[in-house]
Image: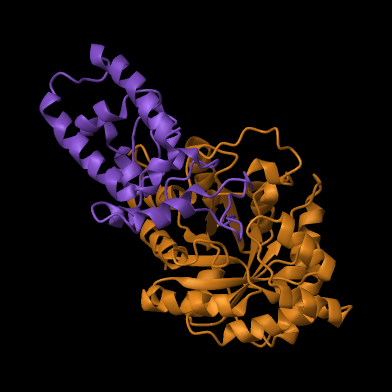
Chain colours: A orange, B purple
């Protein structure tokens, strides 16, 4: 066990894991966080606290995680390299661990141009790979990047992201392997709407033996409709939605986004080497419990988190 | 100006290997902070700037990244593409430009000497080496050591 987090226990027990992304509030009210967490927590093993995703500022992931751990939830703290240099990041990792955070997702982060404050200075001192290795050094060697010793090392279950749906497609499985070498324990992918591409990717991942080294959670999410899907494809970095999926959304009408998501989860679950799904329901958290139930994932026996 | 040269990655890696070998005997003369460094910085800025759009990070890794400068990536990624590469292979941040990592990956496949280094994990950039001579640094490997925590 790396950290003994609820998520890690579920995964190591060989159960199909469900994680869900929480949209952090544009608010200083802690209740806003709890209201959203209450919807997600009963149906998932861990809640992702995003770090200014899409370069839009919201309540920070450290802040959200502090609130969540206080109430006994198991968050995955997302850390992006866009806004903080290595000094700030290492301090946050220690602080987060001290507050009870046991899962961390190491990301590069979207460029500042994707957000509503494109005039901000992009930091990118580390990249996702060096961030992972840095977190790994803190945990396993008990030291900072500089070599200075820690009194107590943080216990963290380390995650990384992958996007099988962005070029260069043939390099993506190797990038996954690189992330494992850098210290990743689990992977959460970008939204999957293209099953043939995912199957191809997973076949290569299995050839590399990575499905036995890493827990791979595939990203899914409901889209509101065909128009929203087209907008996402054009404007959200890294999201790929094939034309036939948009066709289905057009024909299906209301509720088709949710049905599509449920169908995708069912198919993804059958792919060898997949350890779970990561549900990102942007501004539609209320749909997550229904999706989990309809996909037949509610009956998983969950083991309780250690005290 | 000379960007087209990048499409001959194998020739470039041969030039790289030859230059590295040719400079080796001058290790004693070529020291960081020495008189020669200014000259080297000018020369590197001109040649590598014209060919690779070099940003003078002072720790050249071109041979490990498919002879494509990773510092020209808007996120200055050192270890492969981000997840935002567009379906047409263009950059997330600069939609009209091809992703440097997509280009680097293709080019690295043609490099028999250093192509495999594309799979290596590179250490965080040492920001204090910026605007100094990468060639002179390469003759003094102790200057290019990653931080102690990374090494041990």
- Front residue (pair A72, A82): A82
Looking at the image, residue A271 lies above or below residue A52: below
Relative to B92, B12 lies left or right: left
Q: Residue at x 70, y 46 (%)?
A: A114
Quadrant of the rendered image containing residue A103: bottom right
Total label count?
A: 0
Q: Residue at x 30, y 43 (%)?
A: B12
- Where's residue A157, x and y in %? 48, 62
- Where's residue A158, x and y in %? 48, 60
Residue A224 is at least partly visible in this image: no
Relative to A85, A20 lies left or right: right
Q: Residue at x 64, y 57 (%)?
A: A69
Looking at the image, residue B97 lies above or below residue A230: above
Residue B90 is at least partly visible in this image: yes
- Front residue (pair A23, A30): A23
- Front residue (pair A9, A233): A233
Q: Which residue is most to the top? A: B35
Looking at the image, residue A172 lies above or below residue A49: below
Q: Which residue is most to the right? A: A254
- Where's residue B40, x and y in %? 29, 21
Looking at the image, residue B2 lies above or below residue B36: below
Relative to A14, A59 lies left or right: right
């Amino acid at each position: 066990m790396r950290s003994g987090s609820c998520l890690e226990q579920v995964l190591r027990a060989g159960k199909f894991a469900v994680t869900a992304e929480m949209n952090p509030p544009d608010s200083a009210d802690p209740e806003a966080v709890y209201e959203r967490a209450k919807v997600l927590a009963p149906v998932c093993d861990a809640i992702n606290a995003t770090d200014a995703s899409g370069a839009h500022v919201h309540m920070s992931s450290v802040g959200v995680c502090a609130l969540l751990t206080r109430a006994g939830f198991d968050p995955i703290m997302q850390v992006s390299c866009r806004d903080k240099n290595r000094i700030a990041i290492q301090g946050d990792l220690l602080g987060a661990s001290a507050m009870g955070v046991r899962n961390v997702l190491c990301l590069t982060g979207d460029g500042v141009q994707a957000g509503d404050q494109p005039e901000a200075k992009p930091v990118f001192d580390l990249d996702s790979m060096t961030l992972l290795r840095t977190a790994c050094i803190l945990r396993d060697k008990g030291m900072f990047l500089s070599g200075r010793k820690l009194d107590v090392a943080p216990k963290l279950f380390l995650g990384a992201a992958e996007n099988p749906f962005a070029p260069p497609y043939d390099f993506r499985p190797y990038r996954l392997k690189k992330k494992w070498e850098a210290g990743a324990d689990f992977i959460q992918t970008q939204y999957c709407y293209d099953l043939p591409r995912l199957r191809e990717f997973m076949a290569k991942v299995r050839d590399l033996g990575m499905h036995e080294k890493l827990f791979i959670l595939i990203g899914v999410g409901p889209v509101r409709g065909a128009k929203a899907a087209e907008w996402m494809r054009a404007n959200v970095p890294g999201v790929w939605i094939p034309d036939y999926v948009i066709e289905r959304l057009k024909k299906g009408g209301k509720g088709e986004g949710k049905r599509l998501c449920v169908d995708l989860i069912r198919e993804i679950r059958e792919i060898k080497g997949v350890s779970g799904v990561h549900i990102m329901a942007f501004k539609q958290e209320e749909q997550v419990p229904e999706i989990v139930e309809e996909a037949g994932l509610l009956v998983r026996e969950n083991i309780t988190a250690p005290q | 100006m000379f960007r087209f040269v990048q499409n001959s990655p194998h020739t470039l890696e041969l030039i790289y290997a030859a230059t590295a070998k040719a400079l080796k005997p001058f290790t004693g003369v070529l020291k960081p902070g020495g008189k020669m460094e200014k000259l080297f910085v000018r020369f590197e800025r001109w040649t590598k700037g014209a060919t690779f759009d070099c940003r003078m990070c002072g720790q050249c890794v071109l041979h490990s990244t498919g002879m494509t400068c990773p510092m020209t990536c808007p996120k200055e990624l050192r270890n492969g593409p981000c997840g935002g590469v567009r379906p047409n292979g263009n950059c997330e941040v600069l939609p009209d430009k091809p992703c440097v990592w997509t280009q680097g990956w293709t080019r690295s496949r043609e490099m028999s000497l250093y192509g495999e280094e594309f799979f290596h994990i590179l250490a965080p950039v040492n920001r204090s080496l910026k605007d100094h001579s990468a060639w002179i640094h390469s003759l003094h490997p102790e200057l290019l050591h990653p931080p102690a925590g990374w090494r041990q």
